[in-house]
Image: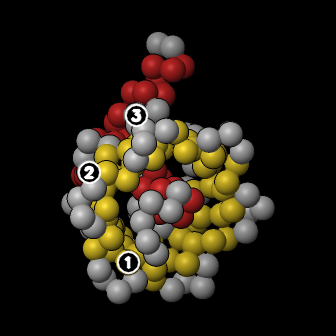
Amino acid sequence: MTRGLEYKTLFAFMLFMICQTISGQSIYDRSNMTIGKISLDGYVYNRSNMTIGRFKSDGYIVDRNNMNVGRIKGDGSILDRSNMTVGKVDLDGTVKDRNNMTLGRVKSDGYVVDRNNMNIGRAKDVPVLYAAVFFFFNMFEK
């Protein structure tokens, strides 16, 4: 099996499992204050518990009005509403921008760090791709 096919298979599996594993997990800022939540069905809520968007099972990301704001592809690429790549999430949780510059990382323990390894938040039990979109690509209001 080629490396590219392995990555595609792994990310396709991750996208499939996302709907199975999200259980209404909260997202926290660096001060451990709740700044959002992702429900079992992929809805994203802000700190006031208002719906700000949704991660759909087909990889599309929509805003509160169900308008497309982006998409997560099977290879970890993050696309904006114009279908332009804005970044990518590597298998180890490293988040890169469209120029392949590291923005930060979603660590296996749920902590999210910036490019200087400084804690910017926590998204324990939230899929890495969702946490990356929430913290690094500003597709939702905060």
Q: Which residue is mark 1?
A: 46
Q: Which mark is drawn over residue 87?
A: none
Colouring mode (rainbow / by chain / secondary structure / one colour): secondary structure
Q: What secondary structure is marked by label 3?
A: loop
Amino acid of disc 1: Asn
Q: Which mark is drawn over residue 56?
A: 2
Q: Which one is earlier in the sequence, the residue at label 2 or at label 3?
A: 2
Q: Is residue 46 left or right of residue 31?
A: left
Q: CA distance from mark 2 to mark 1?
A: 17 Å
Residue 136, image x, y percentages: 56, 59
Amino acid of disc 3: Gly
Amino acid of disc 2: Lys
Crowd band around label 2 with a 10 angstrom C-alpha radius: few (<14), some (14–19), many (20+) = some
Q: Which residue is mark 3?
A: 74
* Quarter of the view holding residue 12: top left
Residue 77, image x, y percentages: 49, 38
Q: Is residue 29 left or right of residue 63?
A: right
Seen at 70% across and 48% down, the residue is 102
In this view, 35 is above or below 54: below
